[in-house]
Image (cartoon, grey):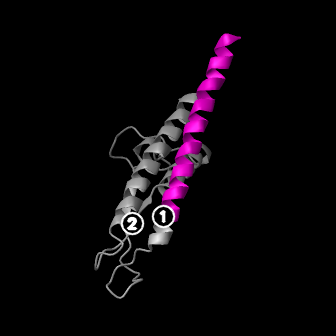
Amino acid sequence: MNSFTRSVDLLQRGMDVASLRYQVSANNLANSEVPNFKRSTVNFESELKRAFDSEVAAQNGMKLATNSERHIQINVPYDYREVQPRRVVDYMTVAKANGNNVDAETEANNILQIQMQYRLLTQLTGFEFEQINTAMKK
C-alpha cells in the first residue's frame, strides 16, 4: 500500500473515530443528571499504536519458515485496518451523590476538542488531495 492511500485511510478512520467520540460525549452530556449513569469514552489510539508496533516488529524480527497453517507463527503483524474503536464505560469513579460520574463541563470541553480535531483531520485530508492535484498538473 502506498503512502498516499495509507494516509488517506488513516485520516478517514480518524474522522470516523472523532464522529463516534462526538456521539459518546454528547450522550454523556445529555445524561449528566441521570442517577447512576456512567460515562463512556472511546479507545482507539492505543490499539492503533499496537498495530503499528507489530508491523515494525515483523519487519525487524526473526523469520520462521512454515509450510502449514497449524505451525506456530511469530512476528505476524496486526493489520491496522482491523483495529476498531471501542467504547469503554467508566464504572470506577463516582462524581456525584446520585452515582453519576459525568462532569458536564468536562464533556462540553471534550466536544469542543473533538470538533477541532475533526476540522484538522478534514484539512489534512484536503491537503493530501491538493498534493496529488499539484503533482498531476506538472
Task: Confirm or deny contact between disc 1 and disc 2 (CB under 8 A).
Answer: yes
Q: Is mark 2 on a helix, strand or loop?
A: helix
Query: Is 49 positioned to the left or the right of 101 in the image?
Result: right
Residue stretch in magenta: 109-138
Query: Is 25 positioned to the left or the right of 124 in the image?
Result: left
Q: Name the residue under label 1.
A: 108
Which quadrant of the view contains residue 3?
top right
Quadrant assignment for the C terminus: top right
In-front residue for pair 135/77: 135
The crowd level at tag 2 (other Cα within 10 Å; few <14, some 14-19, many 20+) is some
Please state the horizontal and vertical placement of residue 6, each as a whole percent of the image.
54, 34
Q: Is mark 1 on a helix, strand or loop?
A: helix
The CA span between labels 1 and 2 is 7 Å
Q: Which of marks 1 and 2 is nearer the N terminus?
A: 2
Please state the horizontal and vertical placement of residue 90, each as a whole percent of the image.
38, 73
Amino acid type at mark 1: Ala
Q: Which residue lies furthest to the left in this view?
A: 35
Residue in view at x 53 percent, y 33 percent: 8
In-front residue for pair 102/43: 102
Q: Name the residue under label 2.
A: 29
* Residue 112 counted in the magenta span: yes
Q: Does the image show residue 73?
A: no
Relative height, residue 29 to residue 15 (above, below): below
